Amino acid sequence: MTIIGRGVKVGNFVEIKNSVIGDGSKIAHHAYIGDTVMGERVNIGAGVIVCNYDGKKKHQTVIGDDVFVGSNTNLIAPVTLHDKSFIAAGSTINKDVPQGMLGIARARQEIKFIKAGPF
């Protein structure tokens, strides 16, 4: 069962399953939120995926109040994003993020020369 709070914005191509979404939260578009307890005034960016299934069991994600999750982020359950935490866009988060902290988990971009191909 899913419970959607007051004033929640659920945009295009968003799937929410077995979750609680707190008042005033926003899930703009292109997101999957499953087995999640989300607090109030959370902002979920485009392309955010809650990875809740490990092949055998579904796990829960907990997102506190006033959390910002940047676009194209993967949240690998079980994980907790504590109140007022921030997640950098493009991150894959598999450890809890403490209150008021910024979670960043992505590889550094490298540019390498490649031999010109037939294109």
Image: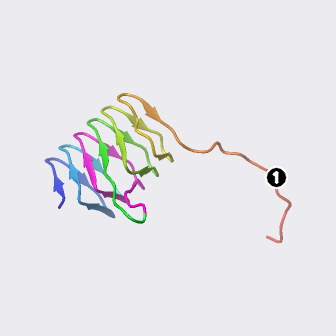
How far across and down, in percent of the image, does residue 83 sit? 30, 33
| Figure coloring | rainbow
Give, as a single range, the part of the protein colored magenta: 31-54
Image point 40% across, 38% down: which residue? 96
Total count of labels: 1
Q: On the rendered image, what quadrant is the C terminus found in?
A: bottom right
What is the residue that sits farthest to the front in this orientation? Answer: 56
Image point 28% across, 35% down: which residue? 66
What is the residue that sits farthest to the top in this orientation? Answer: 100
Image point 38% across, 31% down: which residue? 98
How far across and down, in percent of the image, does residue 61 sit? 32, 48
How far across and down, in percent of the image, does residue 41 sit? 24, 39
Disc 1: which residue? 113
- Residue 116 in the image: above or below residue 6: below
**Of residues 95 and 31, which is closer to you in this image?**
95
**Of residues 9 and 88, which is closer to you in this image?**
88
Q: Left of 54 or right of it: where is 24?
A: left
Image point 26% across, 62% down: which residue? 17
What is the residue that sits farthest to the right in this orientation? Answer: 115
How far across and down, in percent of the image, does residue 51 sit? 40, 57
Q: Amino acid at mark 1?
A: Phe
Q: On the rendered image, what quadrant is the N terminus found in?
A: bottom left
Quarter holding residue 15: bottom left
Q: Left of 103 or right of it: where is 12?
A: left
What is the residue that sits farthest to the left in this orientation? Answer: 6
Q: Is residue 3 magenta?
A: no
Q: What is the crowding at mark 1: few (fewer than 14 residues within 10 Å), some, or many (at least 20)?
A: few
Describe the element under mark 1 as helix, strand or loop.
Answer: loop
